[in-house]
Image (cartoon, coloured by chain):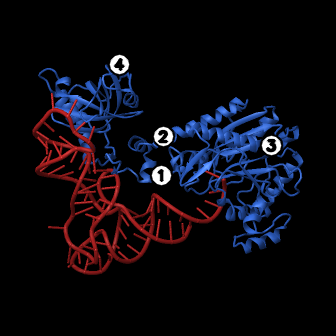
Amino acid sequence: MQLSEQEIVRRQNLQAIRDLGIDPYPAPQFEVNAFAADIKARYEDGAEGFENLRLAGRIMMVRDMGKACFAELQDSTGRIQFYVRRDDICPGEDKRLFDELFKKLLDIGDFVGIEGFVFRTRTGEITVHAKSFTLLCKSLRPLPIVKTDAEGNVYDAFVDPELRHRMRYVDLVVNAGIRETFIQRTKMVNSIREFLNNRGALEVDTPVLQNIPGGATARPFITHHNALDIPMYLRIANELYLKRLVVGGFDWVYEFSRNFRNEGMDRTHNPEFTILEFYVAYKDYNWMMETTEQLLEKVALDLHGATDVQVGDKVLSFKAPFQRIGILDAIKEHTGFDLYGMDEAAMRDVCRQLHIEVDNTMGVGKMVDEIFSEKCEKLYTQPTFITDYPVEMSPLTKRHRSKPGLVERFELMINGKEVANAYSELNDPIDQRERFEEQVVLKDRGDEEAMFIDHDFLRALEFGMPPTAGIGIGIDRLAMLMTNQSTIQEVLFFPQMRPE
RNA sequence: GUAAAGGUAACUCAACCGGCAGAGUACCGGUCUUUUAAACCGGGAGUUGUGGGUUCAAAUCCCUCCCUUUACACCA
């Protein structure tokens, strides 16, 4: 391994610390009783109770003043300045602890614990006057040092997306605000969980390794089970398993499902991603729209204290109710073509007129989907339910109660992207079998994403599934909206990357 | 997959028409007991992504390959 000059220096410092009889990786716990952000928020001049404070964190900057130093300690709550004076640390003749250890052998990034009292410097900075310090962990690699001046100008920012994502631990240490995005994401998930639990929903786990990758149209990752000597698939959705649980008598089940799809990667797609799915017995998609509105309104309020959320240069309103429009009405509105009841050949012609590429593998459903995503999707900035899709593109969805050829389905579009997909679940086992068989035809025509037939799922439906409403909500995409991030990589700690 | 822009020190970036590879931060050595992008003096640090070519001379021009970013396309 080729070490840089700075890495060599740090290893030499490590040895020098050991030569002083100090353990650079000590075992005993360091009891912490104070945090940077809390001290800065609560300290007032002359206030009591700010003595014998113990803080721990990384040294992020040192300003050496000779026989005293100012340094900055970064703990999990933020940064605070601390002050170290030689005569405090080394009251006797032996000054090595200050002159050698503190001034020369400690580096930016090292973890230390300090004990001392709070005061305010002449320039007004709230500072911990450290009477002692303890090395807690020696850091062997230099951190990129990001500096911000009084006007807020940032210098030497650590900004290369590749480096930031590959070394997220460095990103989190060095770039203020990154942790906040992830804390918000977790708050969002907690908020959703609370919403569901309060309504009596049951959180469940279902298989990630599946014999038949069902519940969505997508190309799966394939793996192999050695003992059984069979191919296995990483799940592309958990829908069919949750519905089996509804068959089994659970009225409301949900799962935050990590799904895997073997497709392209870009700023809105990662090979593994999270969808919340839930299924509720005796409900339909109208009920689901109302529930979705309530859920998202609560999430916005929990995270932002308001139903308006700033996303890029737009303000999105999560105030219920949301707009609703049928997909064919939307297409008619934005293209002028009325596709209702149109056959495949006529629709091919429409696609040609709209300059949308079609091929032989595409049925009516796929073409409607293409036209909508090409011409309409990006127009829906505010949360909007797009409803009543053609039956051909919805093989798991119940036929519409009054509109022939359509199904009771909606997708929720926000900021031009699909965030949720929901429907009144198809529970007619004979119809479901026929729909699967139509998928097989598509697969034979070359559609790699068409569904497999899941015979066990059909068997379950034959035992009877009550009328059920189900939904999948893209958690990563929702997190992007709620944290105002424009790429999925910024809401995943470790987005997928090519190996180094 | 397509297109554009890129890859130079640990970080952020320069280097004009091909002419000794630089700056700030960081690092190393000094001075300074309330500084704050601390300051001041001094110093070291590079296989310019890879491989080839043109040339007296290549970070720079040409070709190959690798990688990245951004946009588009596919998908959620």
Q: Which chain carries label 3?
A: A
Q: Mark 2 lies on which chain?
A: A
Visible residue check, residue A29: yes
> Could you say which disc has been placed on residue A457 in the image?
3
The vertical placement of A156 against A203, above or below, is below
Q: Is mark 3 on a helix, strand or loop?
A: helix
Visible residue check, residue A16: no
Q: Residues within 10 Å of mark 1 (few under 14, many from 20)?
A: few
Residue B71 x %, y %: 54, 63
The vertical placement of B17 against B44, above or below, is below
- The residue tagged 1 is A499
> Could you say which disc has been placed on residue A180 in the image?
2
Residue A273 x %, y %: 60, 46
Contact, CB < 8 Å: mark 2 with mark 1? no
- The residue tagged 4 is A49
Looking at marks 2 and 1 on the same chain, the residue that comes earlier in the sequence is marked by 2
Q: In this view, does A139 lie to the left or right of A382?
A: left
